[in-house]
Image: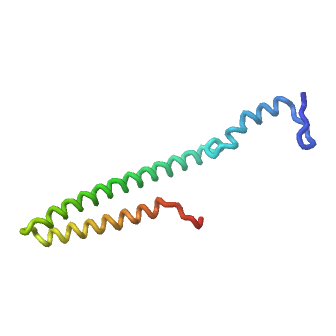
Amino acid sequence: MPVKTRGRSTSRAARLSFNALAPAANSPTGACPEMAEIEDNVDRELFRNVEKLRQLRIEHRDLDEVISRLSLDLHVDQLQLKRLKKRKLLLKDQIARLESQLIPDLNA
């Protein structure tokens, strides 16, 4: 039985074939396999960045503990202590940079 839609009539077969395609056309990844691949790549990159951020925070925390323990020692190598502190600052900068990349831009 034909159905009247906006001045045009469509057959049941046409409606069924459209309905079969409608979910794919409405989903962002179903319409185009390339989009699904792009989204997968974005998800993988996001996961890598979050994992890298976690590793940097752990290393930063560990360095903080080492620096604290070494600071208590009177016979510590001051050059080594300065290098550790510099490494800790570099890690802090990397963490801040990664956090900034992970936060979405509000102006966009």
Quarter of the image containing the C terminus?
bottom right
Q: Quick check: 89 left or right of 79?
A: right
Q: Quick check: 90 left or right of 30?
A: left
The percent position of residue 103, horizontal first and vertical second, equals: 49, 60
The percent position of residue 21, horizontal first and vertical second, equals: 72, 37
Q: In this view, does 74 lie above or below 8?
A: below
State the colouring used for the structure image.
Answer: rainbow
Residue drawn at the location 6% of the way across and 68% of the way down: 75
Which one is nearer the viewer's eye here, 62 or 4?
62
Q: Quick check: 51 left or right of 35?
A: left
The percent position of residue 66, horizontal first and vertical second, equals: 19, 60
Quarter of the image containing the N terminus?
top right
Q: In this view, does 57 lie above or below 76?
A: above
Residue drawn at the location 50% of the way across and 52% of the way down: 42
Residue drawn at the location 93% of the way across and 42% of the way down: 7
Which one is nearer the viewer's eye here, 24 or 55?
55
**Residue 100 falls in image quadrant:** bottom left
The percent position of residue 37, horizontal first and vertical second, equals: 54, 46
